[in-house]
Image (tube, rainbow, N blue to C red):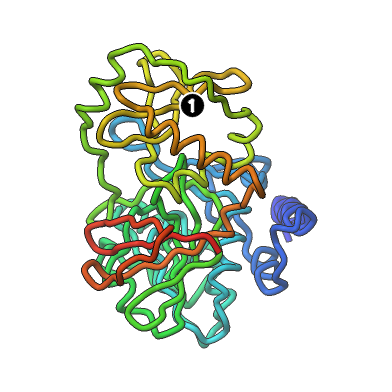
Amino acid sequence: MASGEVDAQRRNDELVTQLESTGILREPAVAAAFRAVLRHRFLPSKPLDEVYEDSAIMTKVGEAGLPVSSSSQPTIMAIMLQLLDPRPGQRVLEIGAGTGYNAALIAHLVGPRGRVVTVEIDPDLAERARANLAGAGVGGVEVALADGAGGWIVTAAADDLSAAWADQLVDGGRLVLPLALGGPGQLCAAFARRGRALAASQLCQCGFMPLRGGMAPGQPAIDDDLARWLDQEGRQTGHVVPAADVRAGFESWLGMTADGYIRTRPRDHEIPAFGLRDARGTALLVGEGDPLPVLVYGDGDAAALRLVVAHQAWARDRPALDRLRIFAFPRGEEPAPPPGVRVVRRPHFTFLVRGA
């Protein structure tokens, strides 16, 4: 073995050991896949010290100078693969081939009797993934050039589900994806099919490039009312929230469980603020101080009261996101939601979010 390959194997072993020591990488089969599949073979132009850091690596920049593809952070890859739990002999569809590295890990997990199809919308990335897989000697993976919206593991962020993804799942089959339903980021959600519905009970925060093509996340609508309210100075309410509570996850919980969650900049030069709005006004936690004051804009007193009550409820036991349950129904097939359940309607699916 050449000295470069020996060095790469050593660095890879150190990375896997690090993931195991943090408690992120718990499943022996997934750990074995990471030890067997070397990441540098899918990032041939990157130096080894960058490749074997536990970090995402940008691999393509679009025309506007914004990143459009990356090799995901190994930590989140390990989490998603353990949520997916692919077994020998199974068939797996991946949306977003990227470098081909994740498909190679899945191929190791499903073995020679299994099959992996990874779908990529970008011709350049699809060709690179094919070349990387061939160079690494990985078999059992088909790279398909197509829009993954026509579709079980989705490695780019979406704000809805494709009906085709659900239709291709057997009952009990799993769909793992980064999903944006509310809050400051995305949730890695592991859905299992239950008849016509899908249910997710394993959730964690993550960050992925958005899907492109037919399932690209929608752009937020222009909110003229909010713009008008924010033209005025915010009014102090006397209520505050400790900055430590925001860092501990209050905003993420609020965004997933409360109707009217918003995140915006009160002024162009100010940092983003978050809070709740209704038809008459908004209440925001503003600034960088500690504690953060609750300011109202427009007739936002009712929104401020809801925000304060939501914080008090969260602060009683500070629930983590994995306490949430998400149920997804094809649009128009959702049941009447019981009290206390948040409803998020998207073009293809309706999501019901409740605490455990």
Task: Tell me if residue 10 can be seen.
Answer: no
Q: In the structure shown, which secondary structural element does the residue marked by tag 1 occupy?
A: strand
Q: Is the C terminus in the top left, top right, bottom left or bottom right quadrant?
A: bottom right
- The residue under label 1 is 285
Viewer-proximal residue among 348 and 21: 348
Residue 139 vs 316, above or below: the answer is below
Viewer-proximal residue among 280 and 324: 280
Residue 242 vs 126, above or below: the answer is above
Q: Picture coordinates of residue 290 (x, y %)?
A: 63, 21
Q: Is the N terminus in the top left, top right, bottom left or bottom right quadrant?
A: bottom right
Task: Tell me if residue 249 can be seen.
Answer: yes
Viewer-proximal residue among 304 and 207: 304
Q: Picture coordinates of residue 228 (x, y %)?
A: 23, 20
The amino acid on which the numbered mark 1 sits, given as a three-letter code, is: Leu
Label 1 neighbour load within 10 Å: few <14, some 14-19, many 20+: many
**Residue visible at 65% across and 69% down in the picture:** 30
Q: Picture coordinates of residue 155 (x, y %)?
A: 44, 57
Q: Along the horizontal axis of the image, is 106 left or right of 279?
A: right
Q: Picture coordinates of residue 110 (x, y %)?
A: 55, 80
**Residue visible at 28% across and 34% down in the picture:** 63
Viewer-proximal residue among 133 and 14: 14
Q: How many marks?
A: 1
Q: Along the horizontal axis of the image, is 36 left or right of 136?
A: right
**Residue visible at 46% across and 83% down in the picture:** 172
